[in-house]
Image (cartoon, helix red, strand yellow):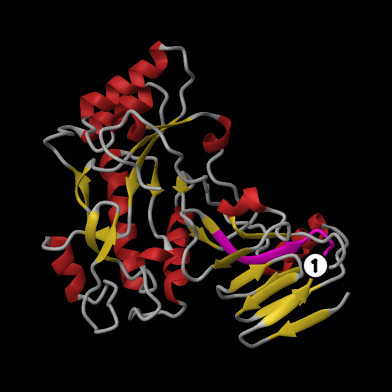
Amino acid sequence: MTTKDLPGTSLFVPHRPGEGWWGGLNDDGLHMPFGRAPLSRDLARDLSGNQGAPLLLSDQGRYLWSDAPFAFEVDGTGLRLRGEARLEEGFGTLRGAFLAASARHFPPSGTLPDERLFTRPQYNTWIEHGYGGTQEGVLAYARGILDHGFPTGVLMIDDNWHRGYGHWDFDRKRFPDPAALVRQLQEMGFPVMLWVCPFVSPDSEEFRWLEKRGLLLLDASGQVALRRWWNGYSAVLDLTHPGAVNWMNEQLGRLQADYGVDGFKLDAGDPIFYRADDRMVGVGGPAAQCEAWARLGLRFPLNEYRACWKLGGQALAQRLKDKAHIGTSSASPA
């Protein structure tokens, strides 16, 4: 086995005869193995709405790993990488390369997410209601599942159950008795998860409280960053700040204590909502924010993520991104 350190801003790894490469972005599965056609990706800028990792695996038993995001290009001659990476060789096969990389860089934690996420169906109100969910509508959705002979499973109450982004409590006009709603769903056999995100609506009490304590992401000028996302413009928690993580944990813990909620769908967190020159307490740029958002879910066995950076081997339920669909009153995020 040989190890080569590859610092600097550019490196070239020639293909071996018949060699293919795998990894980088989960959304690129259709293009793997890389090498059959030209392809370029920048893992620091865009995860294509799904999971990513600074790992490229060869089906001839070698791999490239970096602790930070990198950009790469691949064509018929080889793989070009911009950034810092480490090339490890001598593991025989694709499986051997993956097992070696996993053991060294992201060993399994030994803990699984709640097995109900895999052994039973997952139901989500987004397809049924979009932004228009109500307490009675959610109950009708659950009854319809049973009436049509489908088995019970985890039921996720998606976006707009709350009073505002960052104001993580039920809107009582549409959900007048959330504790009763959760209890009824659980009695019907549905564990209940709520949708949340790291955004905070401006001009809100939560925004003012968080800004005063320095818990919001700042832009390059030192002002609170307001970012465009699929629901408009919002401030963003600086999840590299322990205080912001503690605040979000308090909100989620209160929802469990007050209403008996079982877990959370933690949406967004994509690196595209952050910028390299943002001012944050921690280091690592957009990828660090994405990773910190994912780490927050580790304390909740019933968790679900669409976007994630690294954290292979951890007890996180990570799904494929949304597919095109019809039937909702509003467009779905990617």
Answer left or right for 181 relative to 54.
left
Residues 13 and 167: in front is 13
User: Is 60 rendered above or below residue 243?
Assistant: above
Q: Amino acid at mark 1?
A: Arg
Name which residue lies at 67% across and 68% down: 105
Q: Determine whether the residue tagged by mark 1 lies in a helix, strand or loop.
A: loop
Name which residue lies at 43% across and 38% down: 324
Label 1: how many Cα within 10 Å (few below 14, some 14–19, many 20+): many
Q: Residue furthest bottom?
A: 8
How far across and down, in percent of the image, does residue 54 sit?
Answer: 61, 68
Q: Quadrant of residue 90?
A: bottom right
How far across and down, in percent of the image, does residue 10 sit?
Answer: 64, 83
User: Is 275 rendered above or below residue 169?
Assistant: below
Answer left or right for 307 relative to 239.
right
Range drawn in magenta = 52-62
Answer left or right for 314 relative to 132.
right
Name which residue lies at 85% across and 65% down: 91
Answer left or right for 201 relative to 60.
left
The majority secondary structure of the magenta stretch comes to strand
Residues 181 and 164: in front is 164
- Quarter of the image with the N terminus is bottom right
How far across and down, in percent of the image, does residue 108 sit?
Answer: 66, 57
Confirm whether the magenta stretch covers residue 156: no
Name which residue lies at 22% across and 74% down: 224
Residue with the mark numbered 1: 62
Residues 295 and 223: in front is 223
User: Is 9 rendered above or below residue 47?
Assistant: below
Q: Quadrant of residue 127?
A: top left
User: Is 9 rendered above or below residue 290?
Assistant: below
